Amino acid sequence: MIDKSDLWIVIIGLGIGSFGLRFVFLGIIGDRAMPEWLLRHLRYTAVAIMPALVAPLVLWPAATQGNTDPLRLAAALLALAGAYLTKSVYGGMGAGALVMLLGAYWPV
């Protein structure tokens, strides 16, 4: 159990950090024009963050004590292929979910 004072320090620190990050973009930059190369890079920020969040869960899942699971790896690869072929996030999610469901109920 975490100490209450430590918890509040973390909450306040995260609040200050979140405000500072937003203030840099909204308060300092505001409505000033940004260069085209920066806008192009900012468009891909979300696309870059999602693999960074998912990759550790695929390669070193906690459910397998950090060992790579072939089923999760196959689901991730087919989700990537499904999203690429259908040009839809739902296509990718459906392909990955289908592989996980089939793998969970496949007789071994």
Image: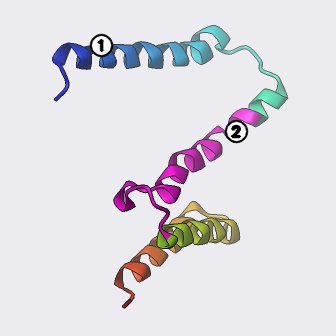
Image coords of residue 57 (percent x, y): 47, 54
Image coords of residue 64 (percent x, y): 38, 62
- Residue 106 lies in the magenta-colored region: no
What residue do we see at 56% from left, 47% from top? 50
The answer to whether the residues at label 1 and label 2 have Cβ atoms under 8 Å apart is: no
Q: Is residue 105 above or below residue 58?
A: below
Q: Quadrant of residue 5?
A: top left
Name the residue that disc number 2 marks: 43
71 horizontally vs 62: left or right: right
User: What's under tag 1, amino acid-wise?
Assistant: Ile
Image coords of residue 22 (percent x, y): 53, 18
- Element class at badge 1: helix
Residue extending farthest bottom: 107
Where's the C terminus, which quadrant? bottom left
Mark number displayed over residue 107: none
What residue do we see at 52% from left, 57% from top? 59
Spatial separation of the CA atoms under disc 1 and disc 2: 33 Å
Q: Is residue 100 above or below residue 65?
A: below
Give the number of the mark in front: 1 or 2: 1
Could you say which is closer to the camera, residue 49 or residue 56? 56
Image coords of residue 105 (percent x, y): 35, 84
Where's the N terminus, which quadrant? top left
Badge 2: few (under 14), some or many (20 or more) residues near its Cα, within 10 Å? few
The mark tally for this picture is 2
Residue extending farthest top: 28
What secondary structure predominates along the stretch shown in magenta? helix
Q: Read off the magenta span.
A: 41-69
